[in-house]
C-alpha cells in the first residue's frame, strides 16, 4: 500500500495525525532518512501539509510519512527556542484571519504588521477581526475605526465582532466555507470563543485571560486543523505572543507593505531601502502623511531588528 495521499491535521512534535483521502485518520511519523527541502525549521512538517505515506502497522493504524507534496504557500515565524530557525505555523492556506483586541489583551499594531508582512510574502489574503468591541468606550471605538480605515485602504478585509452583542458573528461564520483558513492572534483575544460559535461540536478549550501582564494563557502548543465541512478546514494556530519575521531579505521588505509596493520604481535609486536615501518616494509619501506613521515604524522595526519581537 504505497503512495497513499493524506493531509496533516495535527502535530504533537514527533507524531502527526493524518487524514486519508477516504477520511480515515492515522497516526504517523517521519521516515528515518527524511530528506528536507525548503526552509530550516524546528518542525519539518506542519498542519495543512499534503503528504504521501505508507501504512506501517494496520492494526495500530500507524503510518510512515515518506514525502511532502510541494506546498503552495506556508506561514512561518521565528522559532522562540532555536536561534536562526523557523517554526512553520501552517501550509497550503487559502486565507488568514487575524483576531485582535484593543484591550484585554491589547494587540500592538507592530505585531499585526509583522503578521501581515509574513502573509503578504505569499500573497495570502488576510481579514482583520477586531474582537471584544463591547469592552470599548467611545474614544477607544474611534481608535479602532481609525485602524480599520487604515487597513481597509491597504486592501485587507475588516470585521468587528462582539460575542455578548452577537455583533459580526454571522459574518464571521460565513468566512470559512470552502476554504482552508488560518486563524491567528495573541493568546486571550477570543479566538476559541469565536470558533466555538462557528462549530460548537469542536468544543475548543477556552481559558480565562491571565492577570499576569494581561498576556493571556496559552491553550494550544501546536497548530491544529479542524474539518468544519466539505472542503472547509480551519487551522487554529497557537496563541502567539511573539512573531519574528523570517526569510525576507531587507531589500525586499518594502514589497510586502502594499502602500510602499505601489511606489516601487519611483525612487531615485532602484536599490533604495527607504530609510535615508535621497529622492526616496516612500519617505516623501511618509512625510506627506500618505503612509501611516505606525506602518513606517513597523517597517523600520522589522528592517532593523533581526529578532523582531516587541
Image (cartoon, rainbow, N blue to C red):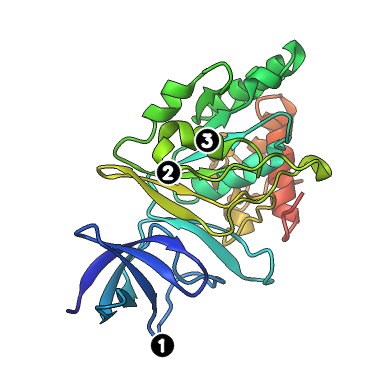
Q: Taking 246 as reference, is 107 above or below it? A: above
Q: Quarter holding the N terminus? A: bottom left
Query: Where on the picture, by quarter, is residue 153?
Result: top right
Q: Earlier in the sequence, mark 1 or mark 3?
A: 1
Q: For label 2, count other residues whose C-alpha is less than 10 Å away and answer few (under 14), some (14-19) or many (20+).
A: few
Q: Nearer the viewer, mark 1 or mark 3?
A: 1
Task: Write the residue at 71% across / 24% down.
Answer: 288
Q: Position of residue 30 (x, y in %)?
A: 40, 79
Q: Secondary structure at mark 2?
A: helix
Query: In terms of image quadrants, where is residue 86?
Result: bottom right
Q: Residue at x 47, y 64 (%)?
A: 11
Residue at the spot of label 2: 202
Residue at far bottom of view: 33
Q: Nearer the viewer, mark 2 or mark 1?
A: 2
Instruction: Report the disc number at residue 284.
Output: none
Horizontal and vertical percent position of residue 253: 60, 51
Within-10-Å neighbours for mark 3: few <14, some 14–19, many 20+: few
Label at residue 262: 3
Whichever of labels 2 and 1 marks the residue nearer the N terminus, that label is 1
Q: Residue 266: give x, y in percent of width and height.
A: 57, 38
Q: CA distance from mark 1 to mark 3?
A: 47 Å
* Front: mark 3 or 2: 2
The residue that label 1 is drawn on is: 32
Name the one closer to the observer, 97 or 237.
237
Q: Residue furthest left?
A: 1
Q: Quadrant of residue 283?
A: top right
Q: Nearer the viewer, residue 211 or 177?
A: 211
Amino acid at each position: 500500500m504505497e503512495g497513499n495521499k493524506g493531509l496533516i491535521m495535527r502535530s504533537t512534535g514527533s507524531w502527526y495525525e493524518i487524514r486519508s483521502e477516504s477520511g480515515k485518520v492515522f497516526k504517523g511519523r517521519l521516515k528515518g532518512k527524511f530528506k528536507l527541502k525548503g526552509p530550516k525549521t524546528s518542525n519539518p512538517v506542519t498542519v495543512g501539509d499534503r503528504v504521501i505515506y505508507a501504512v506501517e502497522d494496520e492494526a495500530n493504524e500507524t503510518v510512515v510519512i515518506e514525502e511532502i507534496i510541494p506546498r503552495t504557500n506556508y506561514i512561518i515565524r521565528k522559532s522562540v527556542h532555536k536561534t536562526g530557525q523557523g517554526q512553520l505555523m501552517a501550509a497550503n492556506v487559502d486565507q488568514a484571519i487575524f483576531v485582535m483586541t484593543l484591550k484585554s489583551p491589547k494587540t500592538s499594531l507592530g505585531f499585526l504588521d509583522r503578521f501581515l508582512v509574513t502573509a503578504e510574502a505569499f500573497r495570502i489574503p488576510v481579514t482583520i477581526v477586531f474582537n471584544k468591541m463591547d469592552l470599548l468606550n467611545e474614544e477607544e471605538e474611534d481608535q479602532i475605526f481609525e485602524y480599520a480605515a487604515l487597513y481597509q485602504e491597504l486592501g485587507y478585509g475588516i470585521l468587528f465582532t462582539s460575542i455578548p452583542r452577537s455583533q459580526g458573528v454571522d459574518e464571521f461564520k460565513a468566512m470559512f466555507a470552502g476554504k482552508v483558513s488560518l486563524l491567528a492572534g495573541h493568546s486571550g483575544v477570543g479566538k476559541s470563543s469565536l470558533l466555538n460559535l462557528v462549530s460548537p461540536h469542536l468544543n475548543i478549550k477556552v481559558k480565562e485571560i491571565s492577570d499576569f501582564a494581561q498576556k493571556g494563557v496559552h491553550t494550544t502548543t501546536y497548530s491544529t486543523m479542524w474539518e468544519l465541512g466539505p472542503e472547509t478546514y480551519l487551522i487554529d494556530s497557537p496563541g502567539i505572543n511573539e512573531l519574528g519575521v523570517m526569510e525576507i531579505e531587507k531589500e525586499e521588505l518594502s514589497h510586502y507593505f502594499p502602500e510602499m509596493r505601489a511606489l516601487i520604481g519611483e525612487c531615485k535609486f532602484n536599490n533604495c531601502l527607504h530609510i535615508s536615501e535621497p529622492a526616496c518616494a516612500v519617505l516623501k509619501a511618509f512625510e506627506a502623511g500618505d503612509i501611516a506613521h505606525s506602518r513606517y515604524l513597523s517597517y523600520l522595526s522589522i528592517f532593523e531588528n533581526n529578532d523582531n519581537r516587541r
